[in-house]
Image: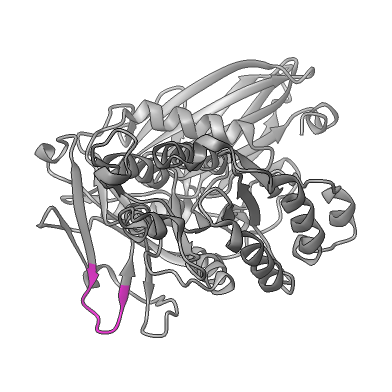
């Protein structure tokens, strides 16, 4: 818990780190999984324990070393006092759900019907929250209807936001405007199946890249007839059969690393173009992407139900982790199976992963860059700072930061609990330009008592800085174990800092 009344936290000095925290890289890489558990009525199960979870990687049993329940109602934090700043922790964490209306991979006869279904089923939604809507156009582009940044065709979302109106209440004019501009004659080459599949995979990577800048767990509800995972020789432009399984797995793995789950909503009401053409198994391709990313392979064809399910799955779930053996990192695709010993409980999570180690520095740099591009604070990891000017030294300021240890992965490794963080501090001048950046790697290594103390009191980092000419500090923490990020802006010159947002 944040606040001055907390007992002293475990302290990490940025100038000289004590034995509990050091910069060495971990020997083992944690596989972190987002898990949804549902009962026979598809309702969340919120009281599972670590002992009820079983994991197999390529058929080999794996001990669970990290387990926690994640929900959308963490304890509320006290309001910061004078000189105190907080990102609010997970109480303010946001989780985006994006609907993708796929015009490229639907028959012309179903496009308008599907658009009307979206309008009818979303127009009564009173609290759309972090729900967004895009279209995949006939030429393979991604077009916002209600975008992640508030972009809307032919509308001023700020006017509606000022009135307190939910964007779903104006979805009909938004959709009508979008369909008028997007329903153009299909470019001739998109009728070639190879071309359409390539455009679709590139478009998925495009929308995935846009979503990855949005912190936390995210879901993509893909309303589509789908694409085949293979083309028969009789329908291939080359005259040979083509299998796209590898490409689908690569796309799925990128989505999974960005914490994006795909919920396909197939629209075969009037027949599929792929079924008519005799191409192989569009449903199979959708299931591959859903399985690798941890979405629902059997998501309802009812658009409203699928959207509600995706949003509900974000609100309650689990994070679990395990350490694969060193010889597991063979660059191949590994099948995963996660089950629950409790009767009647179904587990939804990734069904596999590409076993190639991406450098930790790449993951951290990508997450840090995404956080820097996000104006709102990233709150997957709770951060608090107390700023105290030194009364004796001009421009000298003491900054005490605290990281919420409950939001950090501390998997058990023997009788120790270990984890690795990266703290990045960016200093901004009054003109808004970055003056400098400092990165501090932190390896956490606790016994059971120290872990309990960290969970109770947080992890505190103290630094005394000369901040002459500095208007704002942006602190970003990345957790290598869970992939979670937290950011906090500390305004030293409130007037100048306000102009940067």
Number of marks: 0
Taking 405 as reference, is 163 left or right? right
Taking 190 as reference, is 411 left or right? left
Residue 400 drawn in magenta = no
Q: Nearer the viewer, residue 240 or 56?
A: 240
| Image coordinates for residue 258, horizontal then vertical, percent | 44, 43
Give the magenta part as a residue range. Answer: 339-346
* Above or below 466: residue 98: below
Could you tell me which residue is drawn at 60 percent across and 31 percent down? 372
State the quadrant of the C terminus.
top right
Which image quarter: residue 347? Answer: bottom left
Main secondary structure along the magenta-highlighted residues: loop
| Image coordinates for residue 71, horizontal then vertical, percent | 50, 66
Which image quarter: residue 288? Answer: bottom left
Could you tell me which residue is drawn at 41 percent across and 75 percent down? 46
Q: Nearer the viewer, residue 7 or 373?
A: 373
Residue 93 in sight: yes
Could you tell me which residue is drawn at 25 percent across and 80 percent down? 342
* Above or below 67: residue 242: above
State the quadrant of the N terminus.
bottom right
* Above or below 212: residue 108: below
Q: Nearer the viewer, residue 317 or 277?
A: 277
Residue 96 in sight: no
Q: Nearer the viewer, residue 244 or 125?
A: 244
Taking 342 as reference, is 466 left or right? right
| Image coordinates for residue 497, horizontal then vertical, percent | 78, 30
* Above or below 486: residue 457: below
Could you tell me which residue is drawn at 37 percent across and 81 percent down? 39
**Protein image colouring:** one colour
Which image quarter: residue 348? Answer: bottom left
| Image coordinates for residue 186, horizontal then vertical, percent | 60, 42
């Amino acid at each position: 818990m944040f606040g001055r009344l907390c007992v002293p936290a475990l302290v990490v000095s940025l100038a000289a780190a004590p034995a509990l925290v050091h910069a060495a890289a971990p020997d083992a890489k944690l596989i972190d999984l987002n898990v949804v558990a549902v009962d026979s009525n598809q309702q969340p199960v919120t009281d599972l324990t670590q002992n009820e979870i079983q994991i197999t990687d390529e058929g080999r049993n794996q001990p669970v070393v990290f387990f926690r329940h994640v929900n959308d109602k963490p304890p509320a934090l006290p309001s910061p006092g004078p000189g105190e700043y907080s990102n609010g922790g997970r109480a303010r964490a946001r989780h985006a759900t994006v609907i993708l209306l796929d015009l490229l991979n639907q028959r012309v006869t179903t496009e308008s019907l599907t658009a009307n279904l979206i309008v009818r089923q979303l127009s009564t939604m009173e609290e759309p929250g972090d729900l967004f809507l895009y279209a995949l156009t006939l030429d393979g582009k991604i077009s916002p209807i209600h975008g992640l940044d508030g972009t809307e065709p032919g509308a001023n979302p700020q006017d509606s936001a000022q009135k307190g109106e939910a964007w779903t209440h104006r979805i009909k004019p938004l959709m009508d405007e979008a369909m008028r501009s997007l329903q153009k004659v299909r470019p001739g080459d998109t009728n070639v199946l190879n071309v359409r599949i390539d455009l679709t995979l590139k478009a998925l990577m495009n929308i995935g890249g846009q979503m990855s800048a949005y912190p936390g767990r995210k879901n993509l509800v893909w309303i589509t007839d789908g694409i085949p995972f293979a083309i028969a020789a009789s329908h291939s432009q080359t005259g040979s059969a083509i299998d796209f399984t590898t490409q689908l797995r690569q796309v799925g793995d990128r989505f999974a690393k960005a914490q994006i789950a795909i919920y396909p909503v197939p629209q075969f009401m009037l027949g599929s173009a792929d079924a008519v053409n005799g191409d192989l198994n569009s449903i199979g391709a959708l299931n591959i992407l859903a399985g690798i990313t941890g979405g629902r392979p059997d998501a309802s064809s009812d658009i409203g139900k699928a959207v509600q399910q995706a949003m509900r799955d974000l609100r309650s779930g689990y994070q679990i982790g395990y350490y694969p053996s060193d010889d597991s990192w063979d660059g191949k695709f590994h099948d995963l199976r996660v089950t629950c010993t409790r009767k009647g409980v179904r587990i939804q999570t990734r069904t596999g992963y590409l076993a190639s180690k991406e450098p930790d520095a790449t993951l951290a740099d990508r997450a840090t860059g995404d956080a820097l591009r996000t104006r709102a604070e990233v709150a997957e990891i709770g951060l608090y700072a107390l700023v105290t000017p030194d009364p004796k030294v001009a421009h000298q300021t003491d900054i005490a930061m605290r990281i919420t240890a409950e939001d950090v992965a501390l998997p058990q490794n023997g009788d120790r609990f270990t984890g690795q963080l990266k703290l990045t501090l960016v200093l901004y001048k009054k003109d808004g330009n970055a003056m400098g950046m400092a990165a501090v790697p932190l390896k956490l290594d606790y016994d059971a008592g120290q872990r309990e103390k960290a969970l109770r009191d947080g992890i505190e980092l103290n630094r005394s800085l000369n901040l002459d000419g500095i208007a704002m500090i942006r602190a970003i923490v990345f957790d290598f174990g869970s992939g979670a990020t937290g950011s906090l802006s500390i305004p030293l010159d409130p007037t100048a800092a306000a102009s940067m947002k």
